[in-house]
Image (cartoon, rainbow, N blue to C red):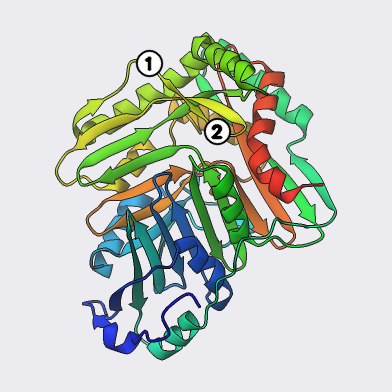
Amino acid sequence: MILDRDLDLRAALTPGPNGIRFAVVPTETDPLTFVRSGGDGFEGVFYFSSPDGAAIGGLGVASKLSFSGSERFARLWSSFEDWALPSPFRAFAGFSFSPDGPSSDAWSSFGSADAVLPIATVLRRGDESLLLLAVPPGVDEQDIQTRLVSMTDPGRAPYPNLGDHTLESHPSVSDWTAAVEEAVGAIDDAAIDKVVLARSVVVRSDSAPNGFDLVSHLERSYRQCYGFGWRSNGATFLGASPELLVRLNDGEVVSNPLAGSARRGEGDEEDRILAEALMRSVKDRVEHSFVVDDVADRLSPFVESLAVPSRPSLKKMATVQHLSTRITGAARRGTRVLNLVGALHPTPAVGGTPRAEAQAFIDKVESFDRGWYTGGIGWFDSDGDGEFAIALRCGLLEGTRAHIFAGAGIVADSHADLELLETRLKFRPMLELLAAT
């Protein structure tokens, strides 16, 4: 049993100004356990966690917004205000790399910028866990209560055993490395300074994986990452991203761009040597500075002050280590996290610089739909606070077919074979789960 069978949902609900009925109930349930146990009973399943231990998991859809185009984040906030959510309710949100939204059939259940208020959410923050209920007009609260109290603990997620599988690279390895060489040529010609080129691998298996079981495995293996899952119409987008796009909390702005990467060593000594080489690498420091400078410039109009470290630090993941800079600031009055998301996306960590020229190059050479990969995923609330990770180290599940994604930042000193190796390292978190032999 996940929730208390004595829960009296009808007595707990309070009508809101928009017709949705709200309730806040203390609980000891873990957000990921909550969505894993109840996912089959609701259409729409959502999850997001932070490295500091905060997490939020939601079931069902009480209300949803979706907008596309260059003003998608402003329109999202404007319509979201009509929900009049009381504290501590939050909306889950995700968005695509392209402002026009995903274009392929695989991404048909995901919009350009979507926000969802679940019917039932478990929020964990610090030592407190709360069950947040939002029952829309016309929905029987007794039915919701019956479904919730009948949920049982699913136990530890089993390691996926998906049978035989095949892998398909999109584009082919030779075409991708040719695109890297073309990008280096464009940089030499001063057409662009940096561009991020992505790859996709399609994994076809005998059996369909459980998306939120995979999230559980990713969280255990990559504790420094932002875990996420979003299921809509049977398709699940999930991952464990190392990169914070932006967080706004009580007036404090934080962004943590990552750019410049190296593999992890086989032992402590090799790992130290690789880390020191990464910190000394002119190529990687230049790539990193493009991102940091751009993020700082784009945050500047929204802050009273901004602190940008003069040199990067290292962020070490299981397979890759990154150059990392944690940028902090004090937000101007009236700033909302969606203002910051709209200003920052796409950073040079996922697009390139100059922004327009890099985007034009990506549009020319990339042969697949990124969808929400290199977009963002997170949450926001009625105060305008929120937290968004860049959607990296991720995959899209459609039954027995999974699309996984990785990319590399191309600058003047890039070499196609080394950039290919970087993408292979970034594929590993998902491939180790989907293509284990």
- Depicted 94 relative to depicted 170: above or below: below
Image quadrant assignment for residue 283: top right
Side of 162 where 135 appears, left or right: left
Side of 240 where 91 appears, left or right: left
Marks 2 and 1 sit apart, C-alpha to C-alpha, by 20 Å
Q: Amino acid at mark 2?
A: Met
Instruction: Specify few, some or many for label 2: CA neighbours under 10 Å numbering under 14, 14-19, or 20 or more.
Output: some
Side of 123 where 236 appears, left or right: right
Q: Can residue 117 be seen in the rendering of this structure? A: no
Image quadrant assignment for residue 269: top right
Residue 187 percent location from the top left of the image: 55, 15
Whichever of labels 2 and 1 marks the residue nearer the N terminus, that label is: 1
Residue 267 percent location from the top left of the image: 65, 22
Report the residue at 32% width, 20% height from top: 309
Circle on res. 77 = none
Report the residue at 37% width, 54% height from top: 379
Q: Secondary structure at mark 1?
A: loop
Q: Secondary structure at mark 2?
A: loop
Report the residue at 53% width, 56% height from top: 229
Report the residue at 29% width, 47% height from top: 337
Front residue of 164/116: it is: 164
- Depicted 308 relative to depicted 67: above or below: above
Q: Which residue is mark 2?
A: 317
Instruction: Specify few, some or many for label 1: CA neighbours under 10 Å numbering under 14, 14-19, or 20 or more.
Output: few
Q: Which residue is mark 1?
A: 311
Q: Amino acid at mark 1?
A: Arg
